[in-house]
Amino acid sequence: MSHGRGPTTRGVRLRKRLALSIAVAFAAKLTPAHAELWGYVDADGIAHFAPTQVDGRFQPVMSPLSGIQRVPGKTDHGQRMLTWLDIAPEVKAVQPYLREAAAATGVDAELLKAIIAVESGFRPEAVSPRGASGLMQITPATAQRYATAEELRRPLHLLEPRTNVMIGARMLADLTRRFGRLDAALAAWNAGEGAVRRAGGQMPDIDETQAHVHLVLELYWALLQRSLGARARQLTMVAAPLE
């Protein structure tokens, strides 16, 4: 998480390799290359999907990966990642905080899990050279902005998992409200709000940010697939509106 860092060649290469692995594993057999899929799960547990954003409830759960071709059949790496997210002790230790943050902010716990996997690999002690810390790579400025009054009465420990996750979830909820789209909110998370505003509220033309957002969304979609059986008792596909 940078809130305005410039792209690095190494970061772009790493995220594109990761994005390719996840896209190959989870997307090749689901939709045609470069397809988009939007969806949400309603209060009655019904999952709704559409090829376009029918209304504001629909968020992108599958986005085209710029410059990356999806190759069917090679799924080992992605499947291992999903299995690790299911069984790793460090992931299980964070689950109560993910559920608490989801209940408090409305941000899906699976989305928080995807962000943490990309940002820190579930290492609560992770600190970036630019000073971002913890599971969700929160900067001190972000912590001051999104901490509660009660939290600010004591020193903020961003390496403490619960504090880090709660602040990160509040920030993502705020960015989603501000920009109205999950992909734009994730872009603002990575590149800073100013970069998204300068792009007219859309994805900025920054390779690292685009790769980061696509990676998070691909992993989120994969996690949603795992959980839809428990979360959704019915699946519907909504037709795109006629233009």
Image: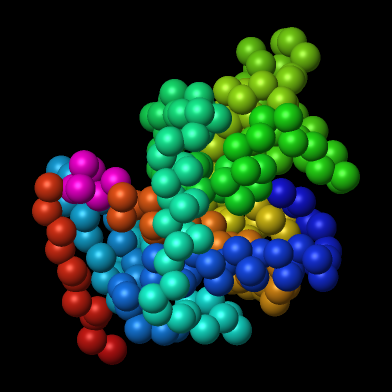
* Magenta residues, start to end: 227-232
Choose top left, top right, bottom left or bottom right for residue 195.
bottom right
Is residue 69 rendered to the left or right of residue 26? right
Does residue 96 appear in this view?
Answer: yes
Number of marks in picture: 0
Q: Residue at x 84, y 39 (%)?
A: 131
Choose top left, top right, bottom left or bottom right for residue 222.
bottom left
Is residue 84 rendered to the left or right of residue 116? left
Q: How far across and down, in percent of the image, does residue 217 sit?
A: 48, 60
Q: Nearer the viewer, residue 68 or 99?
A: 68
Q: Residue furthest left?
A: 234
Choose top left, top right, bottom left or bottom right for residue 99.
top left
Up/down of 99 relative to 2, above or below: above
Q: How far across and down, in percent of the image, does residue 235 sit?
A: 15, 59
Q: Is residue 231 magenta?
A: yes
Q: How far across and down, in percent of the image, does residue 107 sit?
A: 44, 41
Q: Residue furthest right?
A: 129
Q: Residue at x 76, y 51 (%)?
A: 2
Is residue 6 rendered to the left or right of residue 32? right
Q: Nearer the viewer, residue 109 or 80?
A: 80
Is most of the magenta stretch helix, strand or loop? helix
Up/down of 209 relative to 134, above or below: below
Q: How far across and down, in percent of the image, does residue 14 sit?
A: 71, 64
Q: Quadrant of the C terminus?
A: bottom left
Q: Residue at x 74, y 19 (%)?
A: 156
Does residue 220 appear in this view?
Answer: no
Q: Is residue 210 magenta?
A: no
Up/down of 210 relative to 172, above or below: below
Is residue 118 rendered to the left or right of residue 134? left
Q: Residue at x 66, y 64 (%)?
A: 15
